[in-house]
Image (cartoon, rainbow, N blue to C red):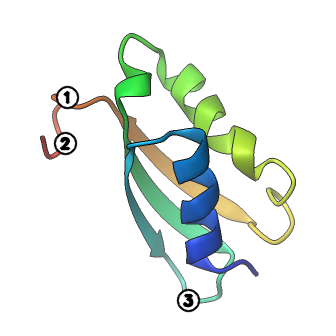
Amino acid sequence: MIPSDEIRRRVSAALPGAMIELRDTVGDGDHYEMVVVSEAFAGRSTLERHRMVYAPLKDILGGALHALALKTLAPGEPGAGT
């Protein structure tokens, strides 16, 4: 189990200025859904974007953070809210 604030802190540090929406999908603190909108994603593939989000979480993935569903967008892309 990991607090959502810790996940948000780590991703924010890796992607400064990113807009992050995070939701605990089942209420157990280890299954989350995250939408990340970042300028850093512009011109990058979905795989590259996901790797950028997973990188600061690698030590907790599969342990304290069991599941993370991601949606990664650059500003201006449909669904980015910008």
Q: Which mark is residue 79?
A: 2
Q: Find residue 15 and report its horizontal and vertical position in percent.
A: 51, 39
Reading the image, the residue beneath label 1 is 77
Marks 3 and 2, how far apart in space?
Answer: 25 Å
Quadrant location, the C terminus: top left
Cα–Cα span, label 2 and label 1:
6 Å
Residue 43 figure quarter:
top left
Circle 2: element type: loop
**Amino acid found under the numbered disc labelled 1:** Glu
Q: Quick check: 63 left or right of 49?
A: right
Residues tagged 3 and 1 counted as in contact (Cβ below 8 A)? no
Report the residue at 35% width, 27% height from top.
Answer: 39
* Earlier-in-chain disc, 3 versus 1: 3
User: Farthest top residue?
Assistant: 43
Mark identifier at residue 27: 3
User: Which residue: 64% across, 88% down?
Assistant: 28
| Number of numbered labels in the structure image | 3
